[in-house]
Image (cartoon, rainbow, N blue to C red):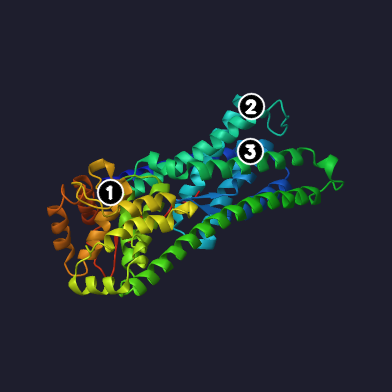
Amino acid sequence: MIPDRSSKLILWVYVWGVIAIALLCFIGAVGHLCVARPALWALVLFAVLAALLELMVVPLAEGGGVSASFAAYFAGLLVFGPSVIVSVAAPVALLTEWLPTRRKLLRAAFNASHTILSLTGAGWVYQTLGGTVGRVAVPGDLLAVFGAALSLWAMETGWVAVAASLERRRRVGRWLRASFVPMLTLDAALASVGLLLALLYQNRSDLVAQQGWQGPALLALIALIPSGLLFYSYRLQGHVRRVYEQSLRTLASLLERKVEGRNAGHGVQVAALAAAIAQAMDLSPREVEQIRYAGFLHDIGKVAVPSSVLAREREQGSWEAQPLRLHPEIGEQVLKPIHFLGPAAEIVRSHHERWDGLGYPDGLRHNEIPLGARILAIANAYVGMTTVLSPEEALGRIRQAAGARFDPHLVEVLAVLLRESGELATAEQPDWQLALSRFPHWML
């Protein structure tokens, strides 16, 4: 949904407020840096390490991403304290976000600012819990280390969650629900790498014979290895999921051409609209994903229907012949053995059920019908109608069937979705996904 003026104003005030407070913290940190005067080569090494890790970003489901620089910043927090590491982190975060991608400077400034505030707060937590900067003791300081890591993660997550929610007019809880597990698991692993790096740095003279910058440089290089592996594994997981979805899209296109004799695109449009409705209802990313998969493959059961029956029904414009009424059950049987499509199989089975109980194959009614199947039924009907009707006419037909064929609440969700998208979609150029999900993402 496109943010209205009040949402934009709140977002603008929030972003500039974060930047202003962070600027004050940065000025104070630079003043402390001039007094503390840590070894320049050590700061340069940490800055280079943080810059390299800052470029390793794992995208999240609801926008934004987790940067591997969490490890370097956390290590610097333990070794140098919040003031010194903030002086390093601010320019590194700003430049590594803005220079390579040429993102808007305001966006880059916001991301650098919430890093400053998070490091400042986490440093205060670390020292309040008894941690000593530059002298981390294990297991004596584990409570302070754990508190600092948890607070750093919570604050980084919180700043971005509020920004993303204001930008998309979504509740903060939804963004957190979508991103909680991947962020927590990755940042927990990166915090462990950061603690290891801090301990290695403290004991560098015992581990490396070199007394100058060469020893810590080697330690920094060693720290890159686990961070890089974590980044690669999470990126690979995301790549596999994209391959899954692309495979389903391709299969849906083949089915449409072979079974139904029409150009590819119906399944993709149904999947996009069904996913957009699910997102508008604040369903979890897992539920949205399964509804999208079901949209791609909702008619896969028609592969078992004789070609003569399909041809006759196409000519007559009717899809109610008895063999065709079996395709939801057949589709479920085809998809159910595939582990990651289990919930989608249930949706496919029930997508021809009706709100009044006169549908098939099980005659379910009202909330007995799975929510995903009710969403898919409306999306399938709307996309099918817009091939011969205008979007307004199609929506009117669906509203007439509310309470009989369709869930009345979902009909209104569809109406609001189409209205707030700013442009009712057409069969040639569906805009539901575009309208809902192509907003800029707040990258961590």
The residue beneath circle 2 is 143
Residue under the point 35% across and 41% down: 171
- The nearer-to-camera label among 3 and 1 is 1
Q: Residues within 10 Å of mark 1 (few under 14, many from 20)?
A: some
Amino acid identity at mark 1: Asp
Looking at the image, residue 362 sits to the left or right of residue 337; the answer is: left
Q: Which type of secondary structure does the marked residue at label 2 adopt? A: helix
Q: Position of residue 437 (x, y in %)?
A: 36, 56
* Relative depth, front residue between 266 and 37: 266
Mark nearer the viewer, 1 or 2: 1
Q: Percent x, y for residue 59?
A: 50, 53
User: Label 3 is placed on what type of residue?
Assistant: Leu
Tag 1 residue: 362
Residue sitting at 66 percent across and 51 percent down? 49
Which of the two discs, 3 and 1, labels the residue nearer the N terminus? 3
Picture layout, residue 282 above or below residue 328: above
In terms of image quadrants, where is residue 127? top right
**Which residue is at a point 17% across and 58% down the rendered structure image?**
395
- Is 128 above or below relative to 444? above
Distance between the alpha carbons at the discs numbered 1 and 2: 56 Å
Can I make out residue 423 in this image? no
> Which of the two discs, 3 and 2, sits closer to the camera?
2
Residue 168 location (% of width, % of height) = 34, 49
Asked which quadrant contains residue 197, the reply is: top right
Q: Which mark is residue 77?
A: 3
